[in-house]
Amino acid sequence: MGIRSRQMPQSELAPVALRQVHLIRGQTPVLNDVSLTVERGEIVMLLGASGSGKTSLLKLVNRLLEPTKGEVWVAGRVTTAWDAIRLRRRIGYVMQDAGLLPHYTVARNVGLLLELERRPAAERRARVAALLELVGLDPAIYAQRFPAALSGGERQRVGVARALALDPALLLMDEPFGALDPVVRARLQQEFAALARTLGKTVLFVTHDLQEALRIGTRICLLARGQLVADAVPDDFLRHDAPDVQAYVQAAGFGAPAQR
Ligand SMILES: Nc1ncnc2c1ncn2[C@@H]1O[C@H](COP(=O)(O)OP(=O)(O)OP(=O)(O)O)[C@@H](O)[C@H]1O
Ligand SMILES: [Mg+2]
């Protein structure tokens, strides 16, 4: 690497960069000129009203969607230049509804990518058990169950375990803890934040929960009317002067920033 590349701003090589992205789905303009860079090791929390385009934005990153205009970069390459399958294997994705295969057991769902990558059975079994433990599900109880026999929160945790299976450097998480009770949620938030930081994961994390965003995020972004109306570190987010942010903060019950 020459001096030129070392002087290049880090964002040129960022794990994720959206550049002036526009997205129209059907007749609906969803994203309008969104630019966002996620640097290695950042945990970027994405807030926004229902229908504001959060899930769509995640899907642009693993190429489940392609921008109508603009570019999405992952690991230094535009998504349209990536082989879609290879791209998705290196990105952990926790879908909003967990997205488990109903006719596969919990163990098989969690180990699916390990199976596709032809990892030996013994390694898969051990890894699946460790992942289930990690998300607080006892393998002896849950491994052989089918998704229909799980609560919504348990399904979400299986979805998180599955996303971590191949130890991806980049994680896309779509409201992964939404269906959990406050106690389990707080524990998983804490463990996840510690894990992501320790392992240096890069994370794009969708949530409706401002408290969660403040707890986990290294940055917080707000989508409104197809645009990124705020992009701030947690300490600055509550004080952000954009009316959309203040409306969101008030609605979330945080009141004036001084009361934090
Ligand atoms: N398959 C689709 N075809 C056409 N429009 C779609 C499709 N999926 C979503 N949309 C529209 O795109 C917009 C953004 O949807 P998206 O799922 O990204 O929102 P969201 O911010 O994730 O909402 P929520 O918080 O409810 O999950 C919405 O207006 C939605 O109706
Ligand atoms: Mg969504």
Image (spheres, grey):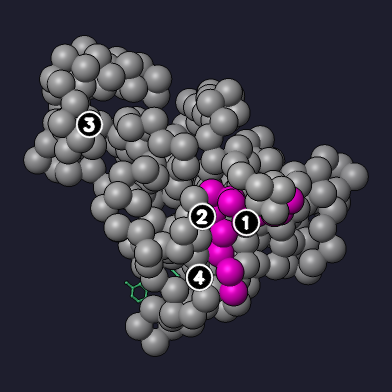
Residue 250 x/y as whole percent? 75, 56
Q: Pick whichever of labels 1 and 3 is earlier in the sequence.
A: 1
Task: Return the residue nearer the eye: 125 or 186.
Answer: 125
Task: Return the residue nearer the eye: 182 or 36.
Answer: 36
Whole-angstrom CA distance, mark 2 to mark 3, is 25 Å
Is the Cβ of the residue at disc 2 closer than 8 Å to that at disc 1?
A: yes
Q: Pick whichever of labels 2 and 3 is earlier in the sequence.
A: 2
Q: Which residue is labeled 2 in the image?
A: 76
Whole-angstrom CA distance, mark 1 to mark 3, is 31 Å
Is the Cβ of the residue at disc 4 closer than 8 Å to that at disc 3?
A: no
Whole-angstrom CA distance, mark 4 to mark 1, is 13 Å
Q: Amino acid at mark 2?
A: Gly
Which residues lie in the magenta part? 7-20
Please name which of the two marks, 2 or 3, marks the residue nearer to the observer.
2
Q: Pick whichever of labels 4 and 1 is earlier in the sequence.
A: 1
Q: Which residue is labeled 4 in the image?
A: 71
In this rendering, position of residue 154 left or right of residue 203: left
- Does any portion of residue 54 appear in the rendered image? no
Please name which of the two marks, 1 or 3, marks the residue nearer to the observer.
1
Q: Is residue 158 magenta?
A: no
SS label for mark 2: loop
Q: Residues within 10 Å of mark 3 (few under 14, many from 20)?
A: many
In this rendering, position of residue 168 left or right of residue 33: left
Q: Amino acid at mark 1?
A: Glu
Q: Which residue is labeled 3 in the image?
A: 114
Quadrant observed for ligand 1 in the rendered image: bottom left
Q: Image point 39% across, 87% down: which residue?
A: 27
Is 161 located above or below residue 80 in the figure? above
Q: Amino acid at mark 4?
A: Glu
